[in-house]
């Protein structure tokens, strides 16, 4: 049972981190553009407007997906109670691989939205340009 508890906690780490950082990015994105902390891509770091836009969008997605992953991870983990360590390990590998994919996928969406909303210099496109 100790192994199951440890793996259960490990399965919850990524969703909890996504929820916390998602909420943090929505409410309080890093004030200045920096290379140490935040949603750092070449497009998001063009100026303060792209920086704020990317953090609010990315934070909202991570916050929502974090809750979805948390619920799914709990449910999947519950099916492994009193199972062998091999089954628990295999299910944990599947859960954590899925979590890592879901953790990374929003980057592609946010980058697409940034490119649709801003030009290559980081200026907001006019409504005619977006259509």
Image (spheres, rainbow, N blue to C red):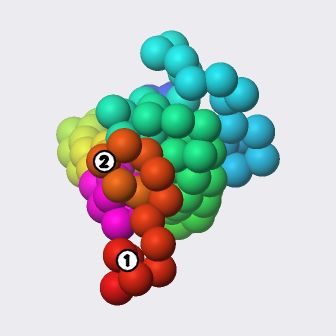
The answer to which image quadrant residue 130 occupies is bottom left
Earlier in the chain: of badge 1 and badge 2, it is 2
- Front one among 8 and 17: 17
Number of on-image labels: 2
Is 26 placed above or below 28 here?
A: below
Residue 43, placed above or below residue 108? above
* Neighbourhood count class around disc 1 (C-alpha, 10 Å): few under 14, some 14–19, many 20 upward: few
Q: Position of residue 111 (x, y in %)?
A: 33, 53
Residue at position x 33%, y 33% from top?
Answer: 42
Task: Confirm or deny contact between disc 1 and disc 2 (CB under 8 A).
Answer: no
The residue indicated by pointer 2 is 120
Residue nearest the viewer, comparing 42 with 3? 42
Residue 46, image x, y percentages: 44, 35
In the picture, measured across the screen, residue 69 lies left or right of residue 85, that is: right
Q: What label sits on residue 39 in the rendered view?
A: none
Q: Residue at position x 60%, y 59% from top?
A: 60
Q: Nearer the viewer, residue 49 or 104?
A: 49
Q: Position of residue 76 (x, y in %)?
A: 41, 61
Q: Which residue is mark 1?
A: 130
Element at badge 1?
helix
Q: Quadrant of residue 18?
A: top right
In this rendering, the answer to whether 37 lies above or below 100 is: above
Q: Residue at x 65, y 23 (%)?
A: 32
Q: Which residues are magenta?
A: 107-117
Residue 67 shown in magenta? no
Q: Residue furthest right?
A: 27
Q: At 37% from the left edge and 43% from the top edge, which residue is drawn?
A: 121
Up-down: is 17 above or below 19? above
Q: Is residue 18 visible?
A: no
Q: Is residue 59 left or right of residue 103?
A: right
Query: Along the horizontal axis of the image, is 12 left or right of 114?
Result: right
User: From where the camera sits, is residue 103 visible?
Assistant: yes
């Amino acid at each position: 049972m100790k192994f199951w508890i440890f793996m259960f906690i490990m399965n919850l780490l990524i969703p909890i981190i996504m929820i916390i950082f998602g909420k943090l990015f929505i409410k309080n994105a890093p004030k200045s553009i920096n290379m140490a902390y935040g949603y750092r891509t070449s497009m998001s770091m063009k100026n303060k407007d792209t920086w704020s836009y990317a953090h609010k969008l990315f934070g909202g997605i991570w916050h929502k997906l974090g809750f979805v992953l948390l619920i799914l991870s709990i449910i999947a983990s519950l099916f492994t109670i009193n199972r062998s360590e091999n089954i628990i390990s295999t299910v944990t590998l599947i859960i954590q691989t899925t979590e890592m994919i879901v953790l990374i996928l929003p980057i592609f969406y946010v980058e697409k939205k940034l490119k649709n909303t801003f030009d290559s210099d980081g200026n907001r496109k006019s409504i005619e340009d977006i259509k």
